[in-house]
Image (cartoon, rainbow, N blue to C red):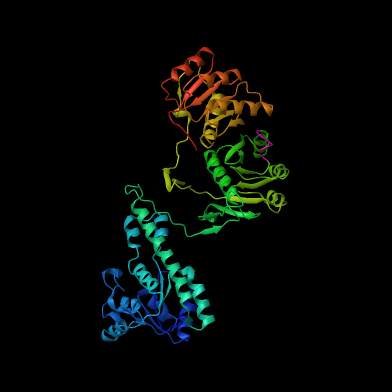
Amino acid sequence: MNNKTISSALISVFSKDGLAPIVKKLNDLNVTIYSTGGTEKFIKDLGIDVVPVEDVTSYPSILGGRVKTLHPKIFGGILNRQNHDGDVAELKEFDIPQIDVVIVDLYPFEKTVASGASNQDIIEKIDIGGISLIRAAAKNYADVTCVSSVDDYAEFLELLETKNGETSEEDRKQFAAKAFNVSSHYDSAIFNYFNKNHEIPSLKISENKGKVLRYGENPHQKGFFFGDFDEIFTKLHGKELSYNNLLDVDAAVNLMLEFKNDAPTFAVLKHNNACGLAQRDTLHQAYIDALAGDPVSAFGGVLISNTEIDVATAEEIHKLFCEVVIAPSFSDEALEILKGKKNRILLILKDIEMPQTNVRSCLNGVLVQDRNNITDSLEGLKSVTKKTATSTELDDLIFASKICKHTKSNTIVLVKNGQLCASGTGQTSRVDALNQAIHKAQSFNFDLNGAVMASDAFFPFPDCVEIADNAGITAVIQPGGSIKDELSINYCNENNVAMVFTGTRHFKH
C-alpha cells in the first residue's frame, strides 16, 4: 500500500482562502510546518508554530522575494527517496529536513493578464519557486503529497480528517496528476502571452474546466466540452446541453453579435444556420417574422434575441417546441412563461468578447485561423452598376451580408425589408444554393419582388444574377474579384439590377 504518515509540510501560497483549517489540522497532528513570507505571517497570526524557510537554508528571501525556496535543503527535502539508503544518508549528512507535504498556490498569472495590467506587473506574476516546488513534489509522489492549488484545499483537508494524517500512494498519485495539470496549464498561459501573434508556430491549448456530455454528435460517440461555459452564459432553466446544442448555441451567439446594439432582432437557428431572422421595431414582431422565415425548420431549434425577451414574445415562443432560448435578459413574467417547459434551456448571454482565434481538428492535427472580424458596412460598399441601390435596399444588403457571413458555404441569402426570406446553405454549387433559396422562399409564400441577394463569394459567371433577376431580386451584394466580374456587371446593367462589391469574401466551411 505504501502508506505514509505526514510529519512535515512546506506551505507557500498566494491564496489563503480555506488554508486556516488545513494549518490547524496539521498542527493538531503534530506536523512540523515550514513556510515563507506572507504565508508564514498568516500561520503565526493563527497562533501556530511555524519554521521559517530561512532557518533551514540560512539564506534570507532575496531579490525582492524572487528567491525564497530555491535551495538544495528545500528541494533535497522534497526530492529524496525515502527507501533509498544513499538519499537518507545525504539528508543526514547535510542536515536536510524531510518534507512530506508541499502546499502551493501559484501567483495569478492569467487573472493579471485579464485585468489589463502592465507588462512588468504580468512578468512579476510568473511564479518560479512555486512551480518548481509543485514539479518536485509531484515527481516524488511515491513519498510526497503535492497540493498545488487553492481549488484542492478542501479535498486535502478531507483527506487529513478522514485518514488522520495518513496518505496512500494512490492518494498522492492523484494529487500529483492534479499538480501536473496545474503546472502545464500555467506554462501554456505564459507561452501564449509571449506568443500572442503566433511568431512561434506552436499551438498550446489548455482548458481546466471540462464537462462530460451525454454523447457526441451521435449516441455512439463520446462527447466532452472543455471551456468555461459560465463565463459566457448564466443558465436559468432546462436540461443539460448536448454536443449538438453547444454547436448551435455557438453559431447563434456569433451570428447575433453582428446585431449587437441594433434594433430588436430575433434569429432561429437549426444545424448551425439561420432558418429565420428579422429586425423590427418590437421584439415580438421580430420573433413573429423570424419564425415566418421557416416555421417547419424552427421546430427543435435554437432561438436568440439581441434584447430582453418580454411577455408578448415569451407567449409566442412558448407555443413552439425549441431546445434553447438565449437573450441578454428575460423579464420576470417572460421567464415564468418559458419555464413552463421543464427541458427548455434558457440562457442569459453575458456581455463578452468571443475568442479571437478559431481552432478545429484536421487530419492528424489542427487548423487555426484568426476570427472573421470583418463585418460589411455601408461605408465599405462599392457600387459597380449603373443603377444604384436605394437606401432600403442598402440596409437589406448589409443585413443579408451579416447573415451570409455566418451561413455554411456555398451560400446565398435572400432578404426583404429586414427579414430573412430564405437561404441556400452548404451547397456544392452557388447556382444550387440560389435555386434552393428561391424555392424555399416561394414555398413559404414570400414575394421576392424587391428582395436583395447576398453571396459569400464572387460570381464567375452571370448565371446567378440572371436567376435572381428572374425571381424579382433587384439588388445584389457580393465580394467581387472574379476575372469575369464584368459578365455579371453587364447583365445587371442590361436588366436594371443594382450590384455592390464588398471586397471581402466570407467563406464558412
Q: Main secondary structure of the magenta part?
A: loop
Residue 16 percent coordinates (x, y): 44, 72
Image vertical order of residue 154 relative to residue 426, above or below: below
Image vertical order of residue 106 relative to residue 119, above or below: below
| Nearest to the observer: residue 377 or residue 98 | 98
Is 485 left or right of 444, judged from the image as shown? left
Residue 27 percent coordinates (x, y): 45, 84
| Nearest to the observer: residue 351 or residue 250 | 250
Is 39 left or right of 457, judged from the image as shown? left
Residue 433 percent coordinates (x, y): 56, 29
- Number of labels in the image equals 0
Residue 132 percent coordinates (x, y): 34, 69
Which residue is rendered at x = 61% and y = 41% of the image?
270
Magenta extent: 293-298
Image vertical order of residue 5 relative to residue 236, above or below: below
In terms of image quadrants, where is residue 239? bottom right
Residue 199 colored in magenta in the image? no
Which residue is rendered at x = 36% and y = 67% of the image?
131
Is 293 left or right of 493, judged from the image as shown? right
In terms of image quadrants, where is residue 119? bottom left
Residue 295 colored in magenta in the image? yes
| Residue 54 in view | yes
| Residue 260 in view | no
Which residue is rendered at x = 53% and y = 37% of the image?
406
Which residue is rendered at x = 43% and y = 64% of the image?
181
Image vertical order of residue 99 relative to residue 331, above or below: below
